[in-house]
Amino acid sequence: MKLKKLVTLAMAGIISTSFLTGCAGNSESSNNGDEKYTVAMITDVAGVNDHSFNQSAWEGLQRAEKELGVEVKYLESKQDADYTTNIDTLVDEEVDLILGVGAKLAPTIEEAAKNYPEQKFLMVDETYENIPSNVKTVLFDAEQSAYLVGLIAGKMSETKNVGFIGGLDIPVINTFKYGYMAGVKTADANCEIQAQYANSFTDQAKGKAIANQMISKNADTIFIAGGDVGTGAIEAIKEAGKYGIGVDRDQSDLAPENVLTSAIKRVDAGIFETVKDFVEGKFEGGTSTTYGLEEDAVGIPESTKNLVPQDILDFVNGQIEKLKAGEISVPKTEEEYNKFIENL
């Protein structure tokens, strides 16, 4: 599905924190008071305050509440077994649109769509070979933003050794991994890359331990795509005086002097746009929409300029133009990455 252009960037290739602000109008003009919709999201186990994916999703719903006049809420999942229970709860409450946030919820949303054929669902960050007719899926070209932060890591590393910490070994996290690695190698083919999974999206202590281990092996820049695991990793990075790279939203607030940049994935924007379509009667079940650089829905935050020299930003912006022109295809899988490296 072709998306409209969402916003013009203040700086070429660098996403502003004011992205999409004020585009939708107030709740009266959007909802006209004709019907009060309720939209609810179910978090994965990282919870709504993960400084990452779930938090960004909730920010999108909060904006929908303010600008579209919908009622919003969330249910946190403390364990995977909570997903089904939370869906049943929201169906019983007659919520109009239920959001599943994160790939781990995909099987549960698919099953719920069969059990509740009249219920509308939004699956964020995962899709299906055959999308149920009452489910809309939203995806992001996360490999593009990961590629950009990889370029920065490769250019900024003084030890020629960088790291990647993933939450789980699943496709959506590997999209970040291989995009990042491709960016690093494009910037410096001789740069070594350490990669490890925490097998969690919540274990801050594990994130800190892995980061310390990588730092002891000479890594000076580490990208973390692991929800709240990143909070612990960035703490270790700050203590060691090294550089970290955030994910999903601008995480520079966690360590302003140490977080070089973040691989932005505008989950909030994707959710807001989809809820807006729902309110306006344009919800299309059985379809998927992908947001990428062309929609200014992935990229790097404006805060990047605080720590990254202008010549490196110019290099990154040049790569952005090549991505938009289709001159570069960023890998999302190991097979694609190996082919990418062969062609460097």
Image (tube, rainbow, N blue to C red):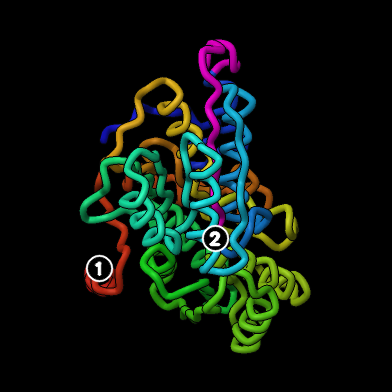
Q: Say which element carries label 1.
A: helix
Residue 62: percent from left, percent from top: 63, 35
The reply, left or right, for residue 329 in relation to residue 298 is left
Q: Which mark is residue 44?
A: 2
The image quadrant where one finds the C terminus is: bottom left
Question: Which residue position holds label 1?
Answer: 336
The image quadrant where one finds the N terminus is: top left
> Residue 118, located in which quarter of the rendered image?
top left
> Residue 301, located in which quarter of the rendered image?
top right
Residue occupying image coordinates x 61% and y 46%? 74
Residue 226: percent from left, percent from top: 55, 67
Name the residue at the front extreme. 92
Tag 2: Cα neighbours inside 10 Å, few (<14), some, or many (≥20)? many
Instruction: Work out whether 22 lies above or below 38.
Output: above
Q: Amino acid at mark 2?
A: Asp
Tag 1: Cα neighbours inside 10 Å, few (<14), some, or many (≥20)? some
Residue occupying image coordinates x 57% and y 27%? 70
Q: Earlier in the sequence, mark 2 or mark 1?
A: 2
* Start-end of magenta stretch: 25-43
